[in-house]
Amino acid sequence: MAVQRMDNVAIVVDDLDAAVAFFTELGMEMEGGGPIEGLWADRTVGLDGVRSDIAMMRTPDGHSKLELTKYHTPAASAAGPENPPPNTLGLHRVMFAVDDIDDTIVRLRAHGAELLGEVAQYETMFRLCYLRGPAGIIVALAEQIG
């Protein structure tokens, strides 16, 4: 049996409203959300007493989703340094194709995003950058130019 599709990527955040605002500014759309709790949640994630809120965000084309999760109990725990460098083992980054990388950076900076390096050009095809987004995750942006 083969995988049917990748459904979503989950990101645990401390401030759900700020993360929703960040990804909305990026151009994602709120698909739904609400509280998650109960025995089924405990069994699924392997924790006792899960009480969380989620926001499901989708890209405008409807093909990709982010599940933003705020854990109330048990409290979220840090897996490593607060702002791990791009070469840290594990989930590396989430990349989005954008129409205008410069405008997107300006809009996301208003939501606390920090450019990790600079906007770089790959040959005559793309302009690329990495930003630090909600919960310290790295959000990569790519603007096709050629």
Image: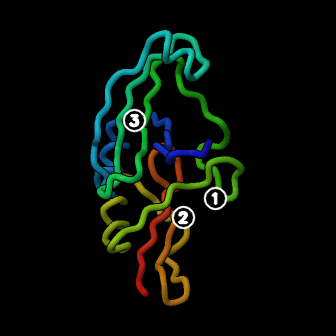
Going by the numbered disc 3, the residue's amino acid type is Asp
Q: Nearer the viewer, residue 91 or 62?
A: 62
Q: For the point 29% across and 35% down, which residue is it?
A: 32
Q: Secondary structure at mark 1?
A: loop
> What residue would you read off at disc 3?
15
Front residue of 136 and 70:
70
Which residue is painted at 53% across and 21% down in the image? Answer: 75
Tell me which numbered mark, 1 or 3, is placed earlier along the sequence.
3
Give me the C-alpha separation between circle 1 and circle 3: 22 Å
**Percent of width and height locating residue 104:** 34, 66
Of the numbered discs 2 and 3, the one sitting upstream in the chain is: 3
> Mark 2 touching mark 1, by CB under 8 A?
yes
Of labels 2 and 1, the one closer to you: 1
Residue 140 position, x and y percent, is 49, 63
Q: Which residue is mark 1?
A: 86
Q: Residues within 10 Å of mark 2 (few under 14, many from 20)?
A: some
Could you tell me how far apart the alpha carbons at marks 2 and 1 are, in whole angstroms? 9 Å
- Residue carrying label 2: 116
78 up-or-down from 100: above or below: above
Residue reaching furthest bottom? 124
Please, what secondary structure does the residue beneath circle 3 have?
loop
Q: Residue furthest front?
A: 1
Mark before the other along the chain sequence, 2 or 1: 1
- Residue 82 drawn at (x, y percent): 60, 43
What is the x, y in percent for residue 18? Answer: 34, 42
Residue at the image position 46 percent from the left and 43 percent from the top:
7
